[in-house]
C-alpha cells in the first residue's frame, strides 16, 4: 500500500512520455509518407526553413518542400490539435454529465455543430470572415449541448438510456437539417456538407490551423484549471456544492468549453466521432479517474490517435484519402458497444 | 444562552416546494459541543430542514444564522469551511478510490492547508469511520454500508464547526451504527455542533444532547431526550403505541407495543 503513490507516479510519467513520443513519431512518419516520399532530413530541414532557419538539411527539391510546408505540416498540426480538443471535450462532458458514455459525437454536439457550419455555408453567410463557419459551428454545438444537457440529466446524473435517446433525437434532427442544407446549397456546398459528415483532414490550411490553435489551446488550459472541481463533481451536484464548488457556474462554463472544443474542430475537419469516448476511457483505465492527469494525458492521447489515424487514412489505399471520421467510427463503434454492455452489467440491466 | 455557545440558529423558517408547505415556522438553536437529533415520521421535513441548514435551499421567509451571520450571505467556499453535510444517498461517478473521495473532503481548505495536515486529517477521518482497510478500493465497488461510511469519512475530513448528517446510520449494521454515534460524540466533545437525522428513537435518546421532533413540517418538541420523549408524544407524532423502557445502563429504549 505504501508503494502505491510511487507506482502511480511512475506510471503517469511513463504513459505521458510514451504518448508524446508516439505523437512525435506519428507526426514525423505522416510528414514522410504520401504520394511523394520525403526523408526525415527533408522533414527536419523544412521545419527549420519554415521557422526561418536555413540549414544544410534543407531539401533541394522545391516540390517536396512545398508539399511539406503547404500541405502535410498544416494537416498534421490540424490532426494533433483536433485530436487533443476532442479528447478533452469528451472528458469534460463525461464529468459534467456524470456518465462515461457522454461524448460530443454520440450525443449530437458534433452534428449540431456541423449543422451550424452547413447553414453558414449553404446560405452564403460570411459576416465574420474566416471565422464565420467556426462561429456558426459553435452556435450549433452550444445549442445542442444545452439541449442534451437539460433533457438527459436529472438530479445531477444522466441515465445512460436517456442520454443515448436524447443523442439519437439530436443526431436525427441535425442529420435532417444537414440534408435540408444540401438541397438549399449548390453542388460545391453539397460536396462540402458530405465532407463534414465523414470528417477529413484533407485540405487543412495554415489559416485554419491558426484559428483552431487560437481557440483550442486556451480552452484546454481553462479546462485543466477546472480539473480539481471536476473531481469533486464526481460526488454528485449537491455534495459538490457542499464542498464549496459553484456547480451552476461550473456547468455553464463547461458547456461553453465543450461546445468550443468540438465546434472549432467540426468547422474545419467535419465530424470525427468517438475520439472523446475512447481516449478518456483508456486513460482512466491506465491512470485512474483524477482529472489533473486525465485531461492533459487525454489531450496528448487524442493527438496521437488522430495523427496516426490520419496517416493511415492517407496511405492505406494508395492514391486515395479515406475520411478519417469513417476510421474513428470503425474503431469507436465496437468500443462503444463494449462500454454500453459493461455499463449495463454494472447497472444490473436497464431500469 | 450566550452567543458564543450558539453555532446555528434558525428563526421562523418556512419552506414551500411547489404547492406543498414542507416546513412551517421552524425555530431552532444548535449549540456547540452538542449532538442535536432530528427525529420524526417519514415526510416530516427532516431532510428539508437539514438542506435549509446546509444553505442549499433558501428559507423563505425566515433566517438561518450560522456563526452569527445570515446563511444567505456566505459564498459557497466560505460555507464549505463552516459546515459539512452527509446526504442520504451517496454515489460517485467514475472509479475514484475511497482515499480519493475522503481527500475531496479537504478541498475547501486547499488554500490554507498543507499536505501534511491533509494527510493527518484524512487518516483520522478514515479511522473514525472505519474505512482504513477500504482506502484503495473503488468507491463504486463498495456495499451500501461501506459507501455510507466512506462518505462519512469525507464529511469528517472536511473538519467543520457544524456537521449535518442525514441518516448516517440508515444502511449500517449494529456495530457501525454505534461507531458512527461514538464518532459524532467525539466531534461534539471537541466543541463542534452535530445535527443528525435519525429514525431510531432509542439511538437518538441514547446519544443526543437535544432532540427535536418534527411532524408535518412543524417542530413539535425540542429538549433533553429524557424530558422530551414519552409514550404520549410518540403516539401523537407517530401514531403508534410504544413502551418507553430503560436499559441496564439507564438509557431510554423505545419499542413498539406488540401483541
Image (tube, coloured by chain):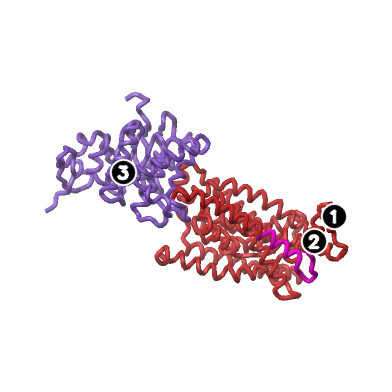
Question: Main SS of the magenta segment?
Answer: helix
Residue at x 67%, y 65% (from the top left corner): A308
Quarter where residue B213 is shown? top left
Q: Chain of mark 1?
A: A
Is residue B51 shown to the viewer in this render? no
Could you say where residue B162 lies in the image, as x and y percent from the top left? Answer: 38, 36
Alpha-carbon distance for marks 2 and 3? 69 Å
In this rendering, is residue A56 above or below B116?
A: below
Residue at x 24%, y 34% (from the top left corner): B224
Task: Indicate the quadrant containing the C terminus of chain A: top left, top right, bottom left or bottom right.
Answer: bottom left
Query: How many other residues sit within 10 Å of disc 3, few (<14), some (14-19) or many (≥20)?
Result: some
Q: Chain of mark 3?
A: B
Could you say where residue A227 lies in the image, as x and y percent from the top left? Answer: 56, 48
Q: Are marks 2 and 3 on the same chain?
A: no
Q: Which residue is mark 2?
A: A41
Q: Earlier in the sequence, mark 2 or mark 1?
A: 2
Q: Chain of mark 2?
A: A
Q: Are the residues tagged 2 and 1 within 8 Å (C-beta)? A: no
Residue B180 badge: 3
Is residue B55 shown to the viewer in this render? yes
Residue at x 84%, y 63% (from the top left corner): A66
Residue A55 badge: 1
Indicate whether residue B243 is drawn in magenta: no
Q: Colour of chain B?
A: purple
Residue furthest to the top: B2
| Residue toward you, B103 or A122 | B103
Alpha-carbon distance for marks 1 and 3? 72 Å
Residue furthest to the front: A3
Q: Is residue A113 left or right of residue B89?
A: right
State which region is magenta.
A22-40
Q: Colour of chain A?
A: red
Amino acid at each position: 500500500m505504501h508503494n502505491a503513490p510511487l507506482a502511480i507516479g511512475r506510471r503517469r510519467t511513463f504513459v505521458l512520455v510514451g504518448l508524446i513520443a508516439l505523437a512525435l513519431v506519428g507526426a514525423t512518419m505522416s510528414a514522410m509518407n504520401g504520394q511523394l516520399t520525403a526523408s526525415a532530413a527533408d522533414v527536419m530541414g523544412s521545419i527549420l526553413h519554415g521557422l526561418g532557419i536555413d540549414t544544410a538539411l534543407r531539401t533541394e527539391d522545391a516540390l517536396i518542400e512545398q508539399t511539406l510546408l503547404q500541405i502535410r505540416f498544416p494537416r498534421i498540426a490540424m490532426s494533433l490539435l483536433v485530436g487533443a480538443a476532442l479528447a478533452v471535450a469528451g472528458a469534460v462532458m463525461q464529468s459534467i454529465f456524470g456518465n462515461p458514455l457522454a461524448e460530443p459525437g454520440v450525443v449530437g454536439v458534433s452534428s449540431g455543430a456541423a449543422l451550424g457550419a452547413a447553414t453558414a455555408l449553404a446560405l452564403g453567410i460570411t459576416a465574420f470572415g474566416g471565422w464565420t463557419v467556426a462561429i456558426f459551428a459553435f452556435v450549433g454545438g452550444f445549442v445542442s449541448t444545452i439541449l442534451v444537457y437539460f433533457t438527459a440529466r436529472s438530479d445531477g446524473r444522466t441515465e445512460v438510456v436517456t442520454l443515448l435517446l436524447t443523442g439519437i433525437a439530436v443526431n436525427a434532427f441535425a442529420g435532417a437539417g444537414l440534408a435540408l442544407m444540401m438541397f438549399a446549397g449548390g453542388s460545391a456546398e453539397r460536396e462540402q456538407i458530405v465532407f463534414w459528415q465523414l470528417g477529413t483532414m484533407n485540405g487543412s490550411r495554415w489559416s485554419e490551423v491558426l484559428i483552431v490553435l487560437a481557440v483550442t489551446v486556451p480552452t484546454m488550459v481553462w479546462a485543466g484549471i477546472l480539473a480539481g472541481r471536476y473531481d469533486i463533481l464526481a460526488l454528485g451536484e449537491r455534495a459538490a456544492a457542499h464542498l464549496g464548488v459553484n456547480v451552476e457556474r461550473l456547468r455553464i462554463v463547461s458547456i461553453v468549453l465543450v461546445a468550443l472544443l468540438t465546434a472549432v474542430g467540426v468547422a474545419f475537419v467535419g465530424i470525427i466521432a468517438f475520439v472523446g469516448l475512447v481516449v478518456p476511457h483508456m486513460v482512466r483505465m491506465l491512470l485512474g479517474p483524477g482529472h489533473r492527469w486525465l485531461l492533459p494525458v487525454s489531450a496528448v492521447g487524442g493527438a496521437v490517435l488522430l495523427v496516426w489515424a490520419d496517416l493511415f487514412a492517407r496511405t492505406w489505399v494508395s492514391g486515395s484519402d479515406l475520411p478519417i471520421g469513417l476510421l474513428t467510427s470503425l474503431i469507436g463503434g465496437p468500443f462503444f458497444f463494449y462500454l454500453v454492455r459493461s455499463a449495463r452489467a454494472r447497472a444490473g440491466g436497464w431500469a | 444562552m450566550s452567543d458564543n455557545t450558539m453555532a446555528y440558529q434558525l428563526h421562523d423558517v418556512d419552506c414551500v416546494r411547489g404547492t406543498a408547505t414542507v416546513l412551517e415556522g421552524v425555530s431552532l438553536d444548535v449549540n456547540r459541543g452538542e449532538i442535536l437529533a432530528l427525529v420524526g415520521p417519514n415526510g416530516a421535513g427532516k431532510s428539508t430542514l437539514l438542506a435549509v441548514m446546509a444553505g442549499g435551499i433558501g428559507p423563505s421567509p425566515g433566517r438561518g444564522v450560522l456563526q452569527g451571520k445570515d446563511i444567505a450571505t456566505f459564498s459557497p467556499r466560505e460555507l464549505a469551511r463552516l459546515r459539512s453535510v452527509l446526504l442520504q444517498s451517496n454515489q460517485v461517478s467514475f472509479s475514484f478510490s475511497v482515499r480519493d473521495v475522503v481527500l475531496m473532503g479537504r478541498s475547501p481548505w486547499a488554500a490554507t492547508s498543507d499536505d501534511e495536515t491533509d494527510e493527518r486529517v484524512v487518516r483520522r477521518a478514515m479511522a473514525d469511520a472505519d474505512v482504513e482497510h477500504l482506502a484503495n478500493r473503488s468507491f463504486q465497488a463498495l456495499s451500501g454500508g461501506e459507501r455510507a461510511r466512506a462518505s462519512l469519512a469525507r464529511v469528517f475530513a472536511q473538519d467543520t464547526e457544524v456537521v449535518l448528517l442525514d441518516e448516517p446510520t440508515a444502511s449500517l449494521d449494529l456495530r457501525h451504527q454505534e461507531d458512527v454515534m461514538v464518532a459524532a460524540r467525539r466531534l461534539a466533545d471537541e466543541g463542534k455542533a452535530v445535527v443528525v437525522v435519525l429514525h431510531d428513537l432509542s439511538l437518538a435518546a441514547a446519544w443526543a444532547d437535544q432532540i427535536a421532533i418534527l411532524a408535518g413540517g412543524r417542530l413539535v418538541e425540542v429538549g433533553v431526550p429524557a424530558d422530551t420523549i414519552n409514550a404520549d408524544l410518540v403516539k401523537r407524532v407517530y401514531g403508534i403505541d410504544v413502551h418507553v423502557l430503560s436499559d441496564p445502563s439507564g438509557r431510554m429504549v423505545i419499542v413498539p407495543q406488540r401483541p
